[in-house]
Structures are given as structure tokens and as C-alpha cells.
């Protein structure tokens, strides 16, 4: 477990990732942009032509048990694999009812009922994932989840999202934007 | 459950709270200051004579179950009670081993073993408390806990801290500063 890493996602005219689609599934969309830059620096430098900027911090496990964490660690792969030329950034905000729940209530909905962790596990190692928290940073979203995969795994990625979004956990999602990206050949 | 509130604690020459004692129980101390200002504004204004500034955000329950949350809600009182003229600010940082634990492991140490929530409950409503998270803000501490109580409850407060610090949860605390405060008569 590394120390928290602050990551900034800049939507605009520059960046390594070309935006192929932006779709608001719930709540307000984000302004359309051509490219996305991902910046992991704690001390951000100015980026030209930014339309919007979202930031979030990696952090400790909030719901995952030791047994689940060990299963994930055995299967998952890191970011920046050479063949993972597709990505998705999915910012999500959950509603006040979700955040008013106690820890055991949220865990019960997220996993015992909605199988969030188990569904994600079904798509490892093809779909790599990093979660960033931003609710307590005063940001417009609660989470920014970043996914990376090879082009041939995009159908599997879509299937995973469809399964997750059909669960009761998603009744608590009040804003969700699905941003698809392609890394240009070097 | 209110939305997250960013709170700044400014140690220096100004502020409603007079510092009576600063004691580092683990790790580096904080520079000695005469007064503490507590600022709840999201848009902070400059404060004169600041020696150090810590910030944290209130947030959702991380470990507390529904049963525990209901018991707490029945007993606890809010901040700023007229007779609560004493306060303590206790910044804490836990070590890497704590943050590498999964959610079920941290809960088991915090409550099933160390009775953190139950011990705090024993001192309600006398000791009012608000927890601020700052690990993911890039701050030097992980938590800032703020306590308020009437002068006659300071021995009970000391007893509560002694009980908590004797638990195994505290083996994971690598930095802790105990700052005691008095609110001057208006």
C-alpha cells in the first residue's frame, strides 16, 4: 500500500489520451473535450487549454476484506501495460442517502448485495483499475475511477459496467460520466 | 450526515482558544504557540501570526456500524456548548502497517479488540468530539480530532485518553500531539 497519490485529470486540448466518447449516465455532463492529460505530480504545472480539471487521491481500502484483497492482488495487473491502449475515466457522485449510511450498511449494499468487488474480479487481469477519492477534497464528484485495457477487451469492459450498473448500489449514484479514451501510437 | 466540512486549525498568536499545554506523545512535536484559531470556511482568509496550520475534512463514518451510530446519536451533544470552555486538538498519524491493512482487519483492531467506539461512548455526553480526515489531503497527520468539554470533565477526558492509548490500536500511532485549550471568557 503506497502513500496517497494525488492525481489530476485535465480535459482539454492536450494530453496523451484522445477522447472518443463522453456520456453522462446520471446528472450533469462534463463539457466535451478532445484530449485528456493525467498528471500524478503533487505540485501541478499549468497545462494549456484546459476545459475542466478533476482531482482525486488514491487511498486505503474502504470496504475490501483481507481475503478479497489477497484475491485481487493475485490477479490484478498495474497501469501502463504496453497493450493497454484504451482507457476510461468514470467520475461518480453518490447521493446523501448513501453517505448517511453507517459502514456496515454501505458494505452490505456494495458487496453482500451488489457484488461490486466480485464482479470487478471477474474481469481481472484484463481490466486494470485505480480508484481516486475526492469527496473530502471539495470536488464535484466522490470518486474518479480509471480503467486501462487492450482494445480487444472493450466488450468485456462494457459488460462489467452493465453488470455493476444493474445493482442496487447504483440506485445511490446521482452523477456519473463515462469518458472513453484511446492512447495514440507513439 | 452533513456534506464534508473543511476545517483549518491555525496555531499562532491569534484565535479564540488559548493554548495551555502542547505535548508530543509520539513523533515530532509541533512548534509551541500561544493561541489557536479554528476556521470552518471553505475559502480561508489570511490569519496574522500563524506558526502552523493544519486542515482536515469531516466525512462519512469509516468503521461505525448502524447500531453504534444510533447509540452515539442518542447520547452525544454538539460543539460550542456554553459550558464547554475547554478543548483539545489531537492530531494523529498512523503508520504504514495500519494503512496496509484491509477494512475488516482495521475494524477488528479498532473496535472488536481495542473498543475505540465503546470507550468514547462511556464519556458521552460530557466529551463532545468531531473527527477530521486529512491523510488524503497531503497533510502531515491522518486525523485531527477536536474535543470540547466543561472544565470539571477534564479528569474524565484524561482517563478516556489513557484507556484509548493503552489499546493495541495505538501501536499503529507513529505521531501524536496533544494540544489543550481554554476558551477565554467573553
Image (cartoon, coloured by chain):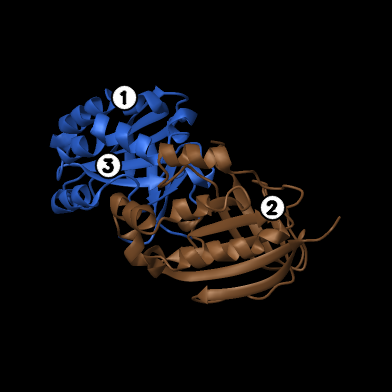
Chain colours: A blue, B brown
Q: Return the residue nearer the eye: A96 or B43.
A: A96
Residue A183 seen anywhere in this rendered image of the structure: no
User: Which residue in the protein does label 2 denote?
Assistant: B39
Residue at left 19%, top 50%? A67
Q: For the residues marked 2 and 1, what is the alpha-carbon distance in whole angstroms?
A: 38 Å
Label 1 belongs to which residue? A168
| Residues at discs 1 and 3 both on one chain | yes
Residue B73 picture location, percent across and down: 54, 39
- Label 1 marks which chain's residue? A
Q: CA distance from mark 1 to mark 3?
A: 22 Å
In the picture provided, is B109 more to the left or to the right than B43?
A: left
Q: Earlier in the sequence, mark 1 or mark 3?
A: 3
* Residues beneath discs 3 and 2 located on the same chain: no
Write down the residue under mark 3: A147
Which dot, 1 or 3, sits closer to the camera? Answer: 1
Q: In the displayed structure, would residue B105 be above or below residue A153?
A: below
Q: Indicate the position of residue B84 as horizontal and vertical percent values.
A: 72, 53
On what subunit does the disc labeled 3 rest? Answer: A
Amino acid at each position: 500500500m503506497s502513500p496517497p497519490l494525488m492525481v489530476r485529470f485535465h480535459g482539454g486540448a492536450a494530453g496523451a489520451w484522445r477522447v472518443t466518447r463522453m456520456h453522462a449516465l446520471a446528472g450533469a455532463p462534463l463539457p466535451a473535450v478532445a484530449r485528456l492529460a493525467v498528471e500524478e505530480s503533487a505540485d501541478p504545472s499549468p497545462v494549456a487549454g484546459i476545459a475542466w480539471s478533476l482531482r482525486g487521491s488514491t487511498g486505503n481500502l474502504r470496504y475490501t476484506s483481507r481475503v478479497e484483497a489477497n484475491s485481487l492482488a493475485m490477479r490484478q495487473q498495474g497501469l501502463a501495460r504496453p497493450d493497454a491502449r484504451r482507457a476510461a475515466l468514470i467520475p461518480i457522485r453518490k447521493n446523501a442517502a448513501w453517505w448517511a449510511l453507517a459502514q456496515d450498511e454501505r458494505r452490505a449494499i456494495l458487496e453482500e448485495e451488489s457484488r461490486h468487488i466480485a464482479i470487478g474480479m471477474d474481469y481481472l487481469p484484463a481490466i486494470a483499475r485505480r480508484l481516486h477519492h475526492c469527496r473530502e477534497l471539495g470536488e464535484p464528484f466522490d470518486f474518479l475511477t480509471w480503467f486501462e485495457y487492450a482494445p480487444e477487451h472493450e466488450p468485456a469492459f462494457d459488460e462489467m459496467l452493465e453488470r455493476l450498473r444493474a445493482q442496487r448500489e447504483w440506485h445511490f449514484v446521482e452523477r456519473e460520466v463515462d469518458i472513453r479514451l484511446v492512447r495514440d501510437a507513439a
